């Protein structure tokens, strides 16, 4: 059993480039200038100015012509359930139907003490005991292992797994959808776990593709970001 109280990790696996080596923003410019038939205005450095114009005017449909694939690890299934609510994305998630979870790994909020016995449990014989988060996770692990030893397959034994169980997921979205995800999941109203992971990813993509994402402001060390316009 392992309890994680740190934010999950991201890894950018791919950012779309053209067959002739066009950068992501050059692809956006190439596609976007079709609308204006202004391909003759493409020049060294013109893509950055063109994409900034699209972004500032809210003409974000053109930004869909580039995409990014990101892998997330050491995150909870609660977090991945939030990801898959976004419609314009392609997720591939670790499967509890096939992966054995006998060595349970669970995410616990960083501001909580997993060893604090705050939960009162009434046993079948009427006795009451206080258990901690860590103890409850341990009981889940024991039950899962027992079911597997009783020849329950993973897809059946998983019924007792907690939503905090650690998962991995790979997500591919176009840049417009990534902007939408950042706007929602970096908000102060977002859940602490997804907010921490997404603010970290936002800082990464701002360094790689700044003109597409630099209108989001990251507020110092606080896990919060917002569009500046």
Image (tube, rainbow, N blue to C red):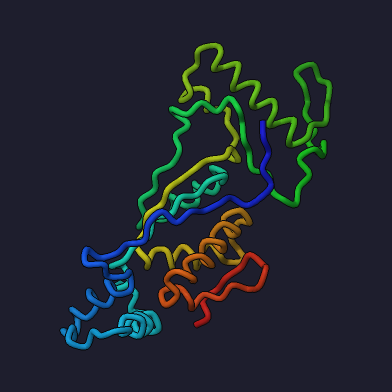
Q: Nearer the viewer, residue 46 or 72?
A: 46
For this view, does 90 lie left or right of residue 214?
A: left
Point out residue 85 in the picture as x, y percentages from the top left corner.
Answer: 44, 52
Classify residue 104 by image quadrant: top right
Q: Note whether 97 is above or below 145 in the view shown.
A: below
Residue 185 coordinates in the image, percent (x, y): 53, 61
- Percent across and percent down for residue 44 are 29, 84
Location of residue 119 in the rendering, given as x and y in whole percent from the top left corner: 78, 36
Instruction: Locate residue 46: give its quadrant.
Output: bottom left
The answer to whether residue 77 is above or below residue 96 is below
Question: In this figure, what is the number of numbered marks?
Answer: 0
Q: Quadrant of residue 213?
A: bottom left
In the image, taking residue 26 as reference, residue 7 lies left or right, namely right
Q: Residue at x 18, y 78 (%)?
A: 34
Closest to the observer, 32 or 184 = 32
Nearer-the-camera pick, 162 or 110: 110
Q: Residue at x 38, y 79 (%)?
A: 55
Is residue 63 shown above or below 124? below
- The quadrant the N terminus occupies is top right
In the image, what residue occupies the spot 69% across and 25% down? 139
**Residue at image point 33% right, 84% down:** 45
Question: Is residue 127 shown above or below 19?
Answer: above
Q: Is residue 214 left or right of residue 177?
A: right
Which residue is at the far bottom?
A: 41
């Amino acid at each position: 059993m392992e309890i994680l109280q740190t934010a999950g990790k991201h890894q950018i696996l791919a950012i779309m480039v053209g067959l002739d080596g066009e950068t992501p923003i050059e692809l956006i410019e190439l596609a976007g200038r079709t609308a204006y038939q202004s391909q003759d205005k493409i020049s060294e450095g013109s893509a950055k100015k063109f994409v900034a114009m699209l972004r500032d005017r809210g003409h974000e449909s053109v930004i869909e012509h580039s995409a990014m694939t990101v892998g997330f690890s050491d995150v909870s299934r609660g977090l991945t359930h939030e990801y898959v609510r976004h419609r314009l994305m392609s997720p591939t998630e670790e499967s509890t139907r096939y992966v054995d979870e006998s060595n349970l790994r669970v995410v616990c909020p960083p501001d909580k003490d997993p060893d604090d016995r705050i939960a009162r449990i009434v046993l079948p014989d009427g006795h009451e005991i206080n258990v901690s988060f860590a103890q409850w996770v341990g009981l889940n692990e024991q039950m899962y292992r027992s079911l597997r030893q009783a020849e329950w397959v993973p897809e059946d034994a998983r019924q007792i797994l907690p939503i905090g169980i650690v998962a991995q997921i790979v997500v591919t979205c176009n840049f417009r959808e990534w902007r939408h995800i950042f706007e929602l999941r970096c908000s102060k109203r977002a859940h602490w776990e997804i907010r921490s992971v997404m603010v970290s990813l936002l800082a990464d993509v701002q360094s790689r593709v700044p003109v597409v994402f630099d209108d989001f402001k990251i507020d110092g060390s606080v896990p919060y970001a917002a569009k500046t316009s």
